[in-house]
Image (tube, rainbow, N blue to C red):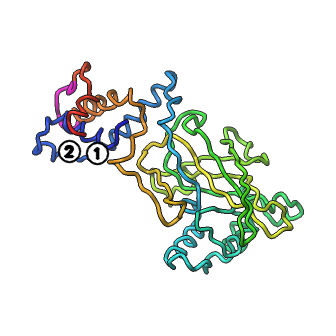
């Protein structure tokens, strides 16, 4: 498998024959943008040919405190980081798990139980119903949800670009976390009204929170998450999970080093393998060369001969 830099610099070398003066006129960031764009097209055009069965198309994005999409939680996490990871309380959020922050990034769903004083909007459940009118029903008091900001997922009908949304949860009593972990496979909402079911359910929404989102992000909302194993006990479920999917821009996926929310691992163009099966790399390079480079630089219509082995050229170019 090739890295993003290997593919991008190979395209430069093929287009300009190693001429440094001409190379300067083409921004490598633009080439990488074209690579991501044509990768997406190749994937969507080859669905019927079984391309989605290739496991190396998919990446896992962690779901943790690091990428919860909530201003108060973000401020809470940042204040903890700014304090040198010692200050466990925040003025803006008086009760997130009763002033608990878990170093490995686990979270509890947002509900009146965990967010009692943050914002008046939390008087409503995820469906806009007043919690006060639901107090007699323990289920609604103990039913939480959470929003995550994630890299934008490739748009394919029926969420076929999503392999799974998976959560792990364990019990936390305020001092000790239980050893037993439950695994929850979260279904993706595919129809109106289905999120009213009691089983955990995920939705991917590009429009929600648009004013605050980077244009290359989406919101992943997970509903119907139980907050406490038993409502009357002083113990909570702590969650952490992943979404495994095909992302528009693979370089936007971020991981946590040693599960620490303040220690992230960014994509490395030199080291990380680009998520596209090897048999499609040649086509990807040719598309970028013959469509984008030719158009933008006014070059011949067929920069690379169809019979040329561009993967071999990539090795010869030193990429």
161 lies left or right of 185: left
Look at the picture and state if 256 lies above or below 249: below
Residue under the point 15% across and 43% down: 23
Please say whether residue 173 is one of the residues in the magenta stretch: no
Disc 2 versus disc 1: distance between alpha carbons?
Answer: 7 Å
The residue identified by callout 1 is: 30
Q: Main secondary structure of the magenta part?
A: loop
Look at the picture and state if 97 lies above or below 139: below
Seen from the viewer's position, the closer of residues 289 and 127 is 289
Q: Quadrant of the C terminus?
A: top left
- In contact (CB < 8 Å): disc 2 and disc 1: yes
Residue at the front extreme of this rendering: 179
Look at the picture and state if 42 lies above or below 268: above
Residue under the point 76% across and 57% down: 226
Q: In the structure shown, which secondary structural element does the residue marked by tag 1 occupy?
A: helix
x and y percent of residue 85 in the render? 53, 75
Look at the picture and state if 301 lies above or below 214: above
Residue under the point 39% across and 42% down: 273
Q: Residue 18 occupies which quadrant of the picture? A: top left
285 lies left or right of 300: right
Q: In the structure shown, which secondary structural element does the residue marked by tag 2 occupy?
A: loop
x and y percent of residue 75 in the render? 55, 72
255 lies left or right of 123: left
223 lies left or right of 317: right
The residue identified by callout 2 is: 26
Question: Circle 1: is it few (<14), some (14-19), or many (20+) Cα within 10 Å?
Answer: few
Residue under the point 37% across and 36% down: 1
Q: Which residues are magenta?
A: 295-304
Residue 213: image tag: none
x and y percent of residue 189 in the render? 67, 42
x and y percent of residue 198 in the render? 79, 48
């Amino acid at each position: 498998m090739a890295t993003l830099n290997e593919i991008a610099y190979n395209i430069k070398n093929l287009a300009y024959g190693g001429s440094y003066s001409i190379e300067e006129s083409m921004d490598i960031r633009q080439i990488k943008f074209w690579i991501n764009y044509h990768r997406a097209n190749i994937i969507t055009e080859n669905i019927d040919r079984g391309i989605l069965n290739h496991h190396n198309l998919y990446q896992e994005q962690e779901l943790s405190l690091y990428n919860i999409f909530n201003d108060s939680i973000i401020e809470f996490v940042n204040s903890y980081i700014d304090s040198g990871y010692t200050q466990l309380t925040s003025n803006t959020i008086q009760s997130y798990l009763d002033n608990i922050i878990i170093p490995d990034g686990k979270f509890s769903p947002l509900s009146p139980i965990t967010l009692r004083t943050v914002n008046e909007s939390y008087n409503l459940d995820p469906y806009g119903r007043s919690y006060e009118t639901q107090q007699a029903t323990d289920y609604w008091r103990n039913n939480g949800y959470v929003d995550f900001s994630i890299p934008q997922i490739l748009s394919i009908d029926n969420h076929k670009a999503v392999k799974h949304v998976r959560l792990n949860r364990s019990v936390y009593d305020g001092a000790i976390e239980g050893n037993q972990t439950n695994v929850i496979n979260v279904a993706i909402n595919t129809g109106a009204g289905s999120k009213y079911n009691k089983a955990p359910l995920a939705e991917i929404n590009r429009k929600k929170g648009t004013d605050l989102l980077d244009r290359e992000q989406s919101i992943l909302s997970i509903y119907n998450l139980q907050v406490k194993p038993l409502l009357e006990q002083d113990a909570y479920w702590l969650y952490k999970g992943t979404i495994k999917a095909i992302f528009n821009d693979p370089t936007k996926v971020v991981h946590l080093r040693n599960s620490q929310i303040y220690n992230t691992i960014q994509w490395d163009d030199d080291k990380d393998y680009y998520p596209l099966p090897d048999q499609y790399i040649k086509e990807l390079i040719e598309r970028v060369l013959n469509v984008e480079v030719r158009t933008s630089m006014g070059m011949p219509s067929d920069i690379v001969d169809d019979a040329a082995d561009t993967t071999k050229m990539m090795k010869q170019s030193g990429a």
